Image (tube, grey):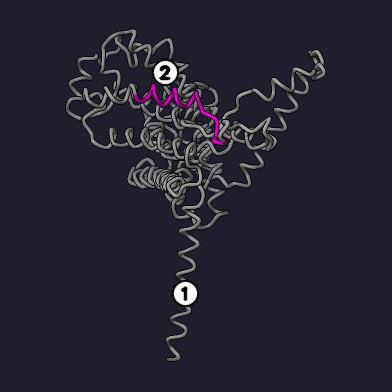
Amino acid sequence: MSSSAPLRETTGTVGRWLARAVQRVTASPLGAYQSAVVRIGVSATCLLFLLREWPHRHELYGPDGPWSWGMARRLISNNDAFTVLMWSDSTIWFETVYVLTLVSAALLTVGWRTRATSVLFMAGVLSLQNRSIFMGDGGDNVIHLMALYLVLTRCARVWSLDARRKANEAARPDSEAARPTDDDGRPARDVTGIVLWAVLGCVLVPSTFLGGLGGTWWLPSLLWLLWLGNGAWWALGRYAPGHELRALFDVLANLAHNASLLVIMAEVCLIYATAGWYKIQGSRWQDGTAIYYPLKLDYFAPWPGLSGLVASSALAVMVLTYATVIVQVAFPFTLFNRRVKNVLLVLMIGEHAGIAVLLGLPFFSMAMIAADAVFLPTVFLLWLGHRVSLGRQRLFTRTAGRFRLPGQRRAGPGDEEATRSGDGTGHTLVG
């Protein structure tokens, strides 16, 4: 009997620990700032790349490329990949898809209607990359994967226009004149969200039944789940905000977000682990000279003088070569030690910054740094956000000092009535 008491106590402790873990995973989305940085970094990288390649878009992904539309169609018929560029070989259709991908990347960067723009961004990235699969590099693969994962994350909780809109709604006075509700007390209709949801549905329905979503089963299932789920989310928020199904939807959304964030972390660890262990097997990495050879290639030398200076030092080449292997192999094993992990994270970000400068691969480096950001500590991200806010305020203050704006006129009797009749926004359908 005496031995059963400690056993029951141990079982109770484990049960309480599991209960707290389940509560933490289901009650709220974790890593709000980390997921926001990943969203901004990935979408901004894709946006800048598409803008830089605007003059060459027809050769990369369009009708003038060496990988013709017919060749891409034959390949896609075998690998069942998804790309809307196979719906038509028209130049107008290609331009439309390219511009929509640009717009969705820009909107996802600022976090406007993130639920909808993340899906459009994923469709645009998959369409362009699957159209010409030989045009990408490692950075494109990272963007490809992150575009898929971001769809399932709640990455607009902070540092987004969606978060600002919700904060403004919450900050409004709780009075009849300013409450964003209808006459019956329900949240006001979100017209923009309804229009977005309807337009996406008008594209999803015919593309599904006409076989335009590729030959896989998971992509149509994911798109239909997102479309129906967001419609049900909005309906519950408007007509039954206190219903148990709404709470269940919150739990499922938090689970999907946290699971996707865990997959992103595992993906980054897998990238570094495989890269590091493959490097160990190379003779040039073993003798400490691997970094020397890309520095001497004209194709990867945007600054020949700087590359030559680094390559001329045998000590620098050896240190950089061995440090690269050590950091990549060791990083997955340091996740349980926060201080060591942060040190290696700084080294990896510095490594990618060096690749961007020395080898002329800025977009590859930006994509990897955006993926690495999932491991950044929240304290640092809060400090960074505070510094950015201060810089923005100082910039706007200086700008306002240069230009004198007319003062605000006093409110008249008619302004109060206009305020009372103004429409607000409540629960969003797609955002």
Mark 2 vs 1: CB contact within 8 A: no
The residue identified by callout 1 is 12
Instruction: Please name the amino acid that badge 1 sits on.
Output: Gly
Figure check: 153 above or below 395? below
Q: Which of 98 and 266 lies nearest the eye of the viewer?
A: 98
Image-quadrant location for residue 229: top left
Picture coordinates of residue 390, whole percent (x, y): 72, 32
Part of the protein shown in magenta: 185-201
Q: Say few, some or many: other residues with alpha carbon within 10 Å of mark 1 (under 14 / 14 to 19 / 20 or more).
A: few
Q: Which residue is mark 2?
A: 100
| Tally of numbered discs | 2
Q: Which one is closest to the eye, mark 2 or mark 1? A: 1
Q: Earlier in the sequence, mark 2 or mark 1?
A: 1
Q: CA distance from mark 2 to mark 1?
A: 55 Å
- Can residue 296 be seen here? yes
- Main SS, magenta region, reads helix
